[in-house]
Amino acid sequence: MNLFLFTLLSGLVSGALYALSALGVSLVAGLMRVVNFSHGEFYIFGAYLSYVFGIVFGLQPWIAMSIAVLIMFLCGLILQWILIRPIYKNQSNALVTTFILSIVLQNIAMIVFGPNPKKPPNYIDGVVRIFGFFEFGAQRLMAGAIAFVILACVLLLVWKTNFGRAIRAVAQDRDMAEAIGINAGWVNSVGFAFSVALAAAAGVLVAPIFPVTPNAGESVTLAAFVVLVFGGVGSIRGCLWGGLILGLVEKFGISYLSSMYSQIFGFVLLVAVLLMRPTGMYGSKV
Amino acid sequence: MLIFILLTQVLSAQAQTFKIGFVGPRTGSAAATGAAFDEGIQLALDKLRADPEYKKHPIDLIFEDSGGVPEKATAAFEKLATKDQVAIVVGESHSSSALAEIEVSNRTGVPFVISEAWSDDLLKKGYKTVFRAGPSNSAVVHGSIAKFIRDSKFKRVVVVAENSDWGKGIAALTDEALTHDHITHSVVSVDHEAKDFYAELNKLKNEKPDLIVAYIYSFGMHTFISQAREVGVHGLILDGAGPPSLWPEFWQNVGTAGNDELFVSCMHEKVQPNAQAKEFWTNYKKKFGHDPSDYKSRSAYTAVLLAADALKRAHAAVSADVIASLEKTNFHAAQGTIHFGNQGTEFHQWAPDMLVVQWQNGKPGDSSTPQHVQQVVYPKKLATGTMMTN
């Protein structure tokens, strides 16, 4: 029973973080039809900035994390204006551009921060005894809880606010959205910057648990694409459920089957979903 | 004309450059080992350049990044052997990379002296060009770890091993040794790139081990240690590779979870087997401003000196002569006197003795001593302190 409950909690926490990591990719894919290969690198740069402000400048962890996410949001605005805006209508160009961007960012990270992992300061210490059954890292629990809160806020933003309505309108039909007065260019800019900030948020939450390296973004991008395809491109609900199911399948697979090849469970699940429902859980047919 | 030709031959022989290739991970999960290798190489080159014997033979050392992955390692060795035309290649810390490199060595005929890749499979094929002047899985398990476990009377042991060539091999040997010694134990395999061990740790917690032997050669070792304490695993942890517990980020990543952690090493300030060891320690401190901590810096230092020694004794910098010279090696290194065996499991192999070291707290309130000190706890005859249990 202990093992089951522990695995369930572990899976939910991982799943929330996977969903948060994938949310930005899903947003950009739905909004601009751009598959952003450099998403993982925004994650690591968020983490690195958190490290710089937290360790090098000695700021309080929550302040360091907030500044890191804000800076990445601004970087997202700039990158969208310079790189993405000119090419997003051509999907092949966008693919190549974001792929090259990811390589450039990885190398910048290697030059600036070196190959060894960097760990921002803990934002909370200690362990929590869960209902007397088992112990769980407090930081990990907090990261999962914050991820859930962010996911809920994004869902509210997209479904209950005017900005969210604008995003959904542009994602559905750009020309019609523009015809009714929505500034699609502005929505694209803010949407892309928001996706970068979401990646950075995931990075700042996770980096104190798993220190960041220049190539750590590769596995983040990979997991994000698994969630994206699994949940349905452009669907935030799909992202959430996809992330949670991936986290649970992975952790239960490790606990009850084998710990040797932990990455295989998500891909087996992905193949199964694609065979049964190629558009993903919440994707729509083209 | 003949005199001119003879003169140029004499002059070129007099100024013959020794081209030595070095392979190791400058990138990837064990890049810190590459940094340690760099330090050792710098010290070795300083020593060689100051040695009048090598005035006639300038050393040209080329370091290629093998990245800890076989495909990169193959390309690195290939480049050294064909484009750079080195006379000998030394180094490497990853068994999976070394297993790829020995094939290139065998094919190109360029001798390869492995420093720190431990898999027993590396010498099993009996390739004439391949040597090892460093630890092997068998030597580490049978010479140190199994004896340490038995003599320290641990009752319940869990072996956690990454699913790499090294990890699988050393875990199997440890399993055999513990079975032979009738010590209750189990073996858990983990992904070699894993950073999250919560599920595995929560399961093994139920076995209430008094010792966990972890064969994880990456920064994953750090997350393993900190997560073990988070989920309430209380036994001692032994890092069966060593360097991850010595990398600069260790204490930042593990915090107080690193207290009383054990690791294997072949170097300690108070265990200096000979003058060469003391010389290395002194020169390291002078050059880098602090004590050496990662024994792989000394491994690289020895590897380069060994290569230079072999090239000096060889009649010519051609494969057959260099191999013959290596087979006659009797080199006084910081780790001991290196000479390679010529048959059976000792064929082209030499291994140093290993220590088991424990991180212990320094003197609290005394700022002149470091916060964490390394104490040799095994073998007992070389121990500098008593093993702490938690």
Image (cartoon, coloured by chain):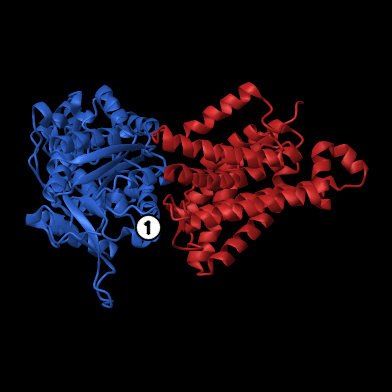
Name the foreground residue: A60 vs B329.
A60
In the image, residue A53 lies at what x, y percent?
A: 54, 65
- Specify the chain shown as blue: B
Residue sitting at x 6%, y 55%: B381
Relative image position of residue B47 (x, y in whole percent): 19, 53
Q: Relative to residue A46, is residue B52 drawn left or right?
A: left
The image shows residue B4 at horizontal and vertical percentages of: 20, 32
Q: Where is residue B125 in the image (x, y as percent from the top left)?
A: 20, 23
Q: Which chain is red?
A: A
Choose top left, top right, bottom left or bottom right for residue B178.
top left
Q: Along the line of sight, which residue is nearer the eye, A13 or B65? A: A13
Against B165, residue A63 (above or below) is: below
At label 1, the amino acid type is Val
Q: Is residue B340 left or right of residue A209?
A: left
Mark 1 surroundings within 10 Å by alpha-carbon count, few (fewer than 14), some (14 through 19), many (20 or more): some
Q: Where does label 1 land, which residue?
A: B254
Q: In the visual, does A34 lie left or right of B104? A: right
Q: Which chain hosts label 1?
A: B
B261 sits to left or right of A215: left
Quadrant in which the C terminus of chain A is drawn: top right
Observer-nearest of A262 and A78: A262
The secondary structure type at the circle numbered 1 is: helix
Which one is in front, A202 or B181? Answer: B181
Q: Which residue lies most toward the right here?
A: A180
Quadrant in which the N terminus of chain A is drawn: top left
User: Eyeballing the image, is B20 above or below A48?
Assistant: above
Is residue A36 visible to the viewer in this orientation of the structure? no
Name the residue at 46% across, 46% down: A6
